[in-house]
């Protein structure tokens, strides 16, 4: 029963790409969805498209106060949050010897610290309710070294470590945490990193022979959000067409 009827799900980065697909799939499965994004207008548009009782909120997940304000607002409006999907993320490519401090710090701030701040803000509400599921977007980049991805790979490896700790500390109180590691998805972020010949070469190394679709990542998120995965905790669900097992 892959349903989310009566559940409230908050999706960061929900205005675009994988997060937007997760919002769609979760709403189709019966959830009330809260779309959180740095682009507040886009978040509100996404929520309006979802219809039902969806809510759109602006937040910068890399700012703990902003993350907490969005979490509190979601709980105030919806009563609780049962599922958190941390999909907000950025990529900034450069050879390691050239990667600037600003790119390094911003990538870590959004991808890793943002995942922590939002997990902490929503996690506190979940622990109080004694129930919750946290789903973090990691990446194939968490386990392999990708050219020009120093900050991104480091941030995603960090997400795996953070997920394991949340899974260890909180599961006894009803809150589980898992991650998803997709291969390339041609979203705005994916196109930035993998357009052109680089992408063609990368695709040849994926056993299924193609990149993933946003809805294929959302399907994995639906599994981790619904009751079918209640015993899954601290896992990384790899959705990469076999890229990392070769
Ligand atoms: P995307 O660029 O399509 O969407 C990312 C969204 O996050 C955007 O709407 C953006 O406004 C929002 N965002 C950025 N910074 C934010 C901040 N500080 N606070 C709140 N929102 C912020 O990217 P996507 O491809 O959908 O990526 C979603 C997640 O999946 C990311 O964590 C990414 O690292 C991960 N991922 C993507 C791919 C891929 O190839 N696309 C592969 C593996 C993992």
Image (spheres, rainbow, N blue to C red):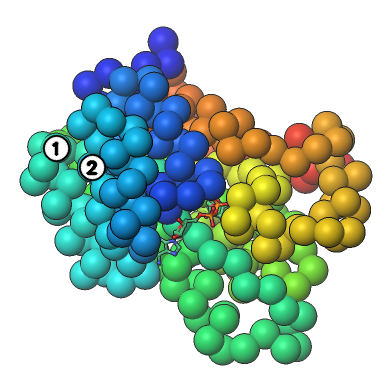
The x and y percentages for residue 56 are 26, 48
Across and down, in percent, residue 39 comes to: 37, 61
Looking at the image, residue 149 lies above or below residue 7: below
Measured in 3D between alpha carbons, the distance from the residue under mark 1 to the one under mark 2, in whole angstroms, is 9 Å
The answer to whether residue 133 is left or right of residue 72 is right
Q: From the image, tell me which residue sits under label 2.
A: 55
Q: Element at badge 2?
A: strand
The residue lying at 69 percent from left, 73 percent from top is: 93
Residue 11 in sight from this viewpoint: no
* Mark 1 beta carbon near ligand 1 (under 8 Å): no
Q: Residue furthest top?
A: 1
Q: CB of mark 1 within 8 Å of CB of mark 2?
A: yes
Which quadrant, please, contains the N terminus?
Answer: top left
Q: Position of residue 129 (x, y in %)?
A: 14, 37
Give the class, few, some or many, for how many residues have Cα within 10 Å of label 2's Cα (few <14, many ≥20): many
Does residue 15 appear in this view?
yes
Q: Quadrant of residue 183?
A: top right
Quarter-wise, where is residue 97 in the image? bottom right
Q: Nearer the viewer, residue 15 or 235?
A: 15
Identify which residue is drawn at 14% across, 53% down: 72
Mark number displayed over residue 78? 1
Q: Is residue 47 left or right of residue 135?
A: left
């Amino acid at each position: 029963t892959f349903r989310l009827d009566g559940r409230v799900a908050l999706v960061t980065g929900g205005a675009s790409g994988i997060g937007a697909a997760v919002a769609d799939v979760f709403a189709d499965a019966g959830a009330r969805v809260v779309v959180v994004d740095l682009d507040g207008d886009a978040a509100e548009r996404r929520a309006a498209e979802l219809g039902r009782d969806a809510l759109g909120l602006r937040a910068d997940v890399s700012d703990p106060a902003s993350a907490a304000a969005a979490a509190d607002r979601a709980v105030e409006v919806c009563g609780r949050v049962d599922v958190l999907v941390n999909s907000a993320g950025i990529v900034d490519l450069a050879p390691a010897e050239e990667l600037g401090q600003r790119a390094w710090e911003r990538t870590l701030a959004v991808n890793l610290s943002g995942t922590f701040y939002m997990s902490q803000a929503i996690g506190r509400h979940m622990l109080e309710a004694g129930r919750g599921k946290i789903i973090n977007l990691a990446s194939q980049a968490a386990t392999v070294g990708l050219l020009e991805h120093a900050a991104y790979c480091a941030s995603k490896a960090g997400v795996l470590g953070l997920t394991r700790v949340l899974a260890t500390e909180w599961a006894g109180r009803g809150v589980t945490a898992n991650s998803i590691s997709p291969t390339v998805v041609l979203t705005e972020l994916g196109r930035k990193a993998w357009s052109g010949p680089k992408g063609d070469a990368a695709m040849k190394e994926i056993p299924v022979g193609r990149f993933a679709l946003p809805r294929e990542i959302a399907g994995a998120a639906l599994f981790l959000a619904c009751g079918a995965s209640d015993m899954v905790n601290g896992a990384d669900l790899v959705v990469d067409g076999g890229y990392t097992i070769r």
